[in-house]
Amino acid sequence: SMKGIHKVSFPHAAKSAEALIRELLKQSPSERLPMKPGGMSNLKSHSWFKGFDWQSLEDQSMVPPYIPVVADKSNFAAREEDRPKSVKYTDDGSGWDLYFGELVLPAAP
C-alpha cells in the first residue's frame, strides 16, 4: 500500500513545486520547512519562490495577476434571507480571545 508524500509521483505540471511540496508535507511537523530553524525565512528563500515579492504580499499592495471583469454582480449580493442567523456573544471575561489576530510563532529550538 502506498503511504506518505515520498511515494507520490508528481505530474509534469507540478515538477517545479515538487521539492517545496515535499518539504511542507513532512509527517513530523518539526521537520516541515517553516518549522525548522530559520522559520518562515526557509519558506521565503525556497527556490520555488524566487522573484516573489513577499513585501508587497505582507503590506497588501500586491497587484493580483488576474482581475476578472464581472458584468453582473447580482450573484455576489447575499439576500437577507440567505445570511446566517446571528448569535449574540456574551464575553465571559476569561480573556481567551485577547491575542486573536496576532501571529505567534514557536520559539526556535
Image (spheres, rainbow, N blue to C red):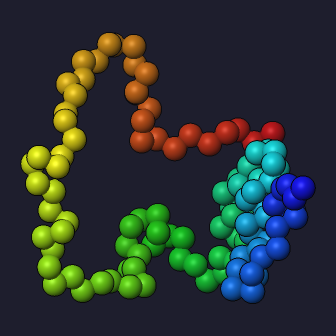
Name the residue located 65 percent from the left edge and 76 percent from the top edge.
49
67 to 94, vertically: above or below: below
Residue 61 in view: yes
Residue 99 vs residue 84, the one in the foreground: 84
Name the residue located 81 percent from the left edge and 45 percent from the top edge.
28
Instruction: Give the total number of marks visible in the rendering.
Output: 0
4 to 88, vertically: above or below: below
Name the residue located 73 percent from the left edge and 66 percent from the top edge.
21
* The N terminus lies in quadrant: bottom right
Quadrant of the rendered image containing residue 59: bottom left
Q: Position of residue 8 (x, y in %)?
A: 82, 67
Name the residue located 24 percent from the left edge and 23 percent from the top edge.
89
Residue 109 vs residue 76, the one in the foreground: 76
Farthest residue, direction left: 80
Q: Position of residue 26 (x, y in %)?
A: 80, 54
Farthest residue, direction front: 1
* The C terminus lies in quadrant: top right
Q: Position of residue 92 (x, y in %)?
A: 32, 13
Q: Position of residue 20 (x, y in %)?
A: 74, 69
63 to 85, vertically: above or below: below
8 vs 94, left or right, is: right
75 vs 22, left or right, is: left
Residue 16 in view: no
104 to 7, vertically: above or below: above
25 vs 51, left or right, is: right
